[in-house]
Image (cartoon, grey):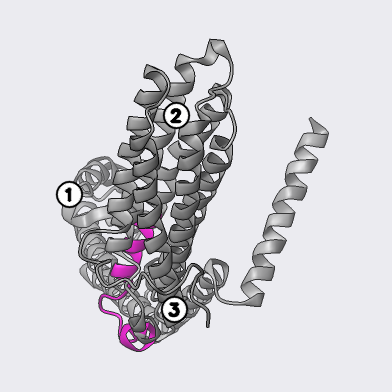
Amino acid sequence: MRHTVGGRACAEAAAVARSVRRAWQGPGRERDLVVLALKATLAAVLAWSVAAWLLRNTLALMAPWVALVLVRTTVYRSVAWALQQTLAIALGTVVATAGAMVLGRPVVAMLLVLPVMLLIGNWQHFGEQGIAGATSALFTLAGGQWSAGIAADRVLAAFLGAGVGVAVNALVLPPVYLRSVEEAAGAVVRECCAILETVAEGLEEPWRYEQAVRWQERARRLPGLLRALCSAVEWAEESTRLNPEHRRRARPATSRPACGEETLRTLEDVADHLQGLTRTLAEAAADSAAAGPVRHTDVTRPYADFLHKVGQALTAYGRTVTGEDTPQARRELEWCLGQVEDAHQELRARLAGRPAPGPAARELSGSLLAEARRLTRRLCPEGTRGGRDTTAGSGPPSC
C-alpha cells in the first residue's frame, strides 16, 4: 500500500513538472491556466484597492471576492456571470438585511432567509450563480450589523468587483480558443487514423474474434474524443463574443477553413462509420469464432488496401484543419481523396466481379462494400471532386 501511495505521489509530481515545463516552453492549455490565474489575482488586488478607497465598510472584501470569481475563461462568460452574480448578491443582501432588521436576531433570520434564498437561487435566470444570493445573505447576517447604508455598501462592493473582473478579463489578454479546437480535432483525427491502420493491417491476414473485439472497443472510445471536440468548438465560438481582440488574434486563422462545426460533423460521420465497420468485423468473426481465424482474405485484403488509402486521406484532411492549410497541404488532400475514390472503384470491381466463396464471405463482402461507400461519400462528396486532374501521375504532389 505504501509503495502504491508513493508511486502515485511520484506520478502526480511528474505530471505537475511536465505541466510547468509545457507552460514555460510555449502556448498551450497550461500557459492559458497560468495567465488566467495571474489575471484573477490582478483583478482581486485592483478590486480590493478600489473598494477600500471608496468604501469604509469592512466587507469591501466582497469586491475582490466577486472579481476573483468572474475572471473566467471567456469574456462573454465573465459578463454573463457578472450580471447573474451581482443581481443574486444584491437580492440576498437586501432580503437578509430586511429580515435581520425586522426580526432582530440573526439565527432566527437565518432560519427564515436562507431557505428562501436557496430556493430563489434555483431560478434558471441565475444560472450557476444562484448560490451567491444565499452566500451574500449569510455574510450579511453573520456580520452582526445591519442597516440600509451597510447593505448599500455591500451591493456597491459587489458591483465594483464585477466591473473590475470583467474589465481585466476583457482588456488583459482576452482569450480566443482557436488552438483548443485544433488540438481536439487533431486528437480525433489521429485516433481515427490509428484505428484505420490497425484494422487494415489486421485484415491483410486471417484475423481472430479477439482482434475484432479490440478494434470495436477502440472505436467505441471515439465519442469521448468527439465530445471534447464539441466542447472545444463551443468554447471557441463563445470566446469570440464581446471579445475586443478576437478579430486581430483570429486573423491568422482566416486563411484556412474554419475548424468548427463542419469539421465536427465530418469527424462524427467518420467515427460513426468506423464503429459500423468494426461492428461488422466483430459480428463476422463471432460467427466463426469456434472455427478459428476468419480466412476470407480474398475479400479483406483488397479492403485493407482501401482502408490504407482512407487513412492517408484522413491524415491529410487533419493537417488542413489543424493549422497547416498550405497550398501544398490542399494539393496533397486532393490527391489523397482521388486515391480514395479510385480505391473504392477498384474495390467494387474486384469484389463484385469475383463471386465470394460461400454465403458468409458474400455477406461480409456486401457489408464491407456498404461501409466503404459510406466512408467514400463522406470524405468525397459529389461535386467536390469533379475537377481532379487524373493525369497528374501516380505519386503525391511535391513542393
In the image, residue 164 lies in the stretch drawn in magenta: no
Q: Disc 2 vs disc 1: which is toward the camera?
A: 2
Residue 43 disc label: 3
> Which quadrant, please, contains the N terminus?
top right
Position of residue 160 relative to residue 372, above or below, is: below
Splitting the image into 4 quarters, where does residue 185 fall? bottom left
- State the residue lying farthest toward the bottom: 248
Of the residues shown, which amino acid type is indicated by label 3?
A: Ala
The secondary structure making up most of the magenta span is helix
Q: Is residue 238 magenta?
A: yes
Q: Which residues are magenta?
A: 229-250
**Distance between the alpha carbons at the discs numbered 1 and 3:** 28 Å
- Percent across and percent down for residue 231 are 36, 56
Q: Is residue 240 left or right of residue 221?
A: left
Residue 114 position in % (x across, y down) = 27, 45
x 29%, y 45%: residue: 374
Q: Compare marks 2 and 1 and give the one earlier in the sequence.
A: 1
Residue under pointer 2: 281
Q: Amino acid at mark 1?
A: Trp
What residue is disc 1 on? 123
Q: Is residue 197 visible?
A: yes
